Structures are given as C-alpha cells and as structure tokens.
Image (cartoon, rainbow, N blue to C red):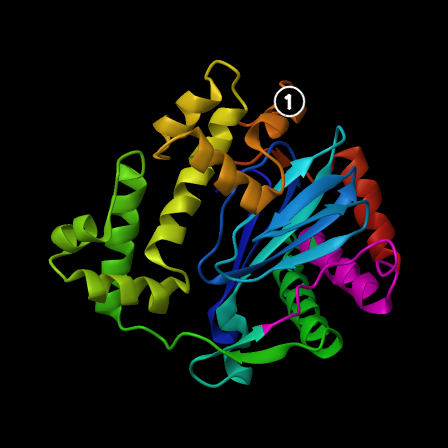
Amino acid sequence: MEKDYHELQYPRDNLYLACYINESLNYRYHWHPAEYEFQIVLCGKQEFCREKENFVMEEDDIVLVEPNTGHASFSTTLNTRTLVIRFSSLAFRPFLKTGESFSFHGLCSSKDTRREPRYTRIRFYAAQLLDAASQTSPYSQLAARGSAQLLLATLLGDCAPRTITTLPEQNEARQELMQSLARYMEEHYQEKITLEDLARFSQYNRTYISTLFKNMVGINFYDYLMRIRLKYAILDLADDKKSLTEIALDNGFSDLKSFNSRFREIFRYPPAEYRRRVSRDCVLHDLGRRLVPVHDPLVRAKLDQYMAL
C-alpha cells in the first residue's frame, strides 16, 4: 500500500473505500468503472472536468463523480491540495433493485452553495474518515467505519438522489471478455483499431462487441477508445519535446485536427492552450498521484477546521 493512501474494507456492509490527500497538478484523465469519488479542495484552486462539464473549484468546494464518468483536475495555483474519497457503488446495493443506481444530479458546490449544511456535514465526516484511517489506535477502524457510514447517509439523506435504471449485473464471462477487450485497447490504442479488430481478437462478431460496450460501460466502442487516447495524450502535452502533431499521431489520432476537436470537446479549449498553461515545475508524467501526508501543515489545519464542527 502506498504511504498515506488508505484502503478500508467492510464486506458485511458492502463498503469498500480509499481515501488520501492529493496534490492537484496537471490534467490526468481517468474514470472508475464501479466507484463514486468525492473531491474536496482543502486549499488552492483547480479547474475540474467531469465528462463535458468544466468548472472552477475553490477552497472548501466539493464535487462528486459518479461511476464510469471521465474526469480530470488541473491546478491553477501552487499547493492545491484535495481530499479524495472513493467508494464502491456496492455500498448502495441494499437500497436499490437489480439494474438500478443512484444519480446525484451532478453534485458540486460553488461560491453560493458551499456553506450549505449538507456540504458542511460532508466535509465534517470526510475529514473524520481520513483522520481515523490514518490512526493506528485499536479503535480507529471503528471510527473510520462510522464516519464512512454517516458520510453516505448524508449523501442519501441530504442530496436527494435520483434512482435511475442502468445496466443489469453482468455474468462473469461477459466481465472477463470486457476486461480482455479493455486490455487489448490499452495495448494497441496507438494503432488504428476497429470493431472488426476486436471481433477477430475475441472471436465474436462486431455487433456483439458493439452491444457489449454499450451494455457493460455505457458508452460505445469509439468513445471508449478516444478516452484511452486522450488519457495518454494529455501526459505527453506536459512535455514540450514533442510537437502537437507528433502527440496526436503517437496516440492514435488520425491527425492534429481530430486531436484538437476531441480535446476541445472535453476540456473546452485546444491542447495548445493547455500546454501553454502547464507549469513545468508542477507536472506528473504518469498516471500516478502525488500524495500529501495528513500531518502536512496546510492539510492538518484544514482537517481540524472541518472537524471543529
């Protein structure tokens, strides 16, 4: 386990969590197939992309990202720290029928709403959760579990979730096939990949593969492939050794025009502008994280402030 990265598992409650403090740097585009994610800005300021939404998050702001939703953050000030909590969608299973999930209406605070009681409570329980997870006392796990449950209770009770019909639970064979296709695309995203290629690889017909993507991940094959290509192209943009055309071609885009179009569609401005804005001193060149310990002075002061409620 990474230092300052905390994983908590409570199988009887279908509760599986990860929590940590992250230093927000350059965009790293990713998604979680079956997890919700909270981000709370402890200090600093960041741009946040959630699918095709783009907004600015300031100190004390909260955003919730739902499963399989592409997202990325980009710090616009030095020392931007965020408290991140990810939890499995299984936590809501007792309250839902098969094929249902909760949607939280694009939950995100702003200057006008961040002091609402529900957001204050979310910050309170999130801070308690991380603080307990970082302790080694015999009772810290009990405190962490209780804080996690109260955090989810606040989310359900105060944030008016909408029950939506989603994808039915898939059998093991389909899950294994989808994982195999995802690995294939990760290995070959720089090449020209078609549904026919996946059909030959998997020995299923293209119609079945196309339907599988829709049913398993909720987006079509092409959009999933574009996500992977963007994920790696964004990393290359933080390095000024490559031209934009080289980055486009090296990451599977047919030309610079298509790369520009897809990037602008997601992030609302072209890759050239993003490259100009990236600080070379605040860049991660991979898909990892820059973790910050709980005893960091900026972090500790903010957690204590939240828990003083």
Going by the picture, which residue comes out furthest to the top?
241
Question: Who's the residue at 35% across and 51% down the image?
Answer: 222
Residue 248 at x, y = what percent?
Answer: 41, 29
Image vertical order of residue 90 relative to residue 258, above or below: below
Q: Is residue 124 magenta?
A: yes
- Write down the quadrant of residue 293 in the picture: top right
User: Mark 1 — residue?
Assistant: 276
The answer to whether residue 65 is left or right of residue 301 is: left
Residue 258 at x, y = what percent?
Answer: 43, 37
Q: Between 265 and 170, which is closer to the camera in this rendering?
A: 265
Residue 114 seen in the figure = yes
Q: Between 179 and 221, which is closer to the camera in this rendering?
A: 221
Residue 127 at x, y = what percent?
Answer: 74, 54
Question: Who's the residue at 80% across and 45% down the image?
Answer: 58
Q: Indicate the secondary structure of the residue bearing disc 1.
A: helix
Q: Is residue 114 magenta?
A: yes
Q: Between 158 and 303, which is closer to the camera in this rendering?
A: 158
Of the residues shown, which amino acid type is indicated by label 1?
Arg
Residue 39 at x, y = what percent?
Answer: 67, 51
Which quadrant of the figure contains the C terminus? bottom right
The answer to whether residue 198 is left or right of residue 277 is: left
- Mark 1 residue crowding within 10 angstroms, few (<14) / some (14–19) / many (20+): few
Question: Who's the residue at 31% across and 34% down the image?
Answer: 190
- Residue extent of the magenta highlight: 103-131
